[in-house]
Amino acid sequence: MKRFILKSKTAIIVAGVALLAVAGVAYYLVSNNDEKKAVSVNITTANEQGEQQTEQKTAGVTKASDIDSTLSAWKTAGLTVSGDKGVAYQMVGASNGGKYDVGATNVELYEYESVAKAGEARQSSFFADPADAVFVTGTLLVVVHSTDPATVDPIKAVF
């Protein structure tokens, strides 16, 4: 009888541990599956349009993520934006670029193929002027020809 009770207790403990393991694996698979779904939705959207996704939704707020969405976001924020004056963006390894007047300030936008390439470009001496506010946000490198917070902060606010 003692032996039967001991075996049943052991069986219950083993079953409990196995149940916890199965629950843990199921949780892991469900968690990763949600992440994969989110990624594949973004990739599918980009492929169907034949271009990169131009806006990101984060907590219900539209964030600028490329040149077009940045210009739109500045305009929506009430900043005056004039047309592209053109920049030789290929010289700094960018895939796209432009120079704009945002308010009374010259702003250059450089779009790179990846976040890593934008970060590498930020480190180059080409963007080392201390009179400029230079920052990277995603695949964009932004050069604001001012360091005045009253000028730079509204420009940065859309990112």
Image (cartoon, helix red, strand yellow):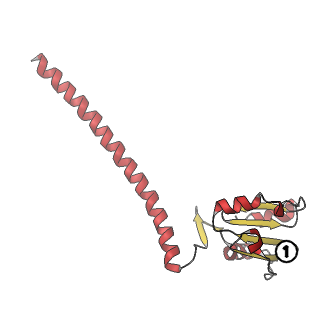
- On screen, residue 90 versus residue 11, left or right, reads right
Mark 1 is surrounded, within 10 Å at the Cα level, by few (under 14), some (14 to 19) or many (20 or more) other residues, namely some
SS at badge 1 = loop
50 lies above or below 3:
below
Amino acid type, callout 1: Gly
User: Percent position (x, y) of residue 132?
Assistant: 86, 62
Q: Position of residue 64 (x, y in %)?
A: 67, 69
**Front-lying residue, 114 or 72:** 114
| Quadrant showing the C terminus | bottom right
Q: Pick out the residue farthest to the top.
A: 2
Residue occupying the point 49% across, 63% down: 39
Q: Quadrant of residue 114?
A: bottom right
Residue under pointer 1: 103
Q: For this rendering, which residue is in front, 35 or 104?
A: 35
Q: How many marks?
A: 1
- Judging depth in this view, the residue of 33 and 121 nearest the camera is 121
Could you tell whether 159 is left or right of 43 in the image?
A: right
User: Residue 127: x, y in percent?
Assistant: 82, 62
110 to the left or right of 145: left
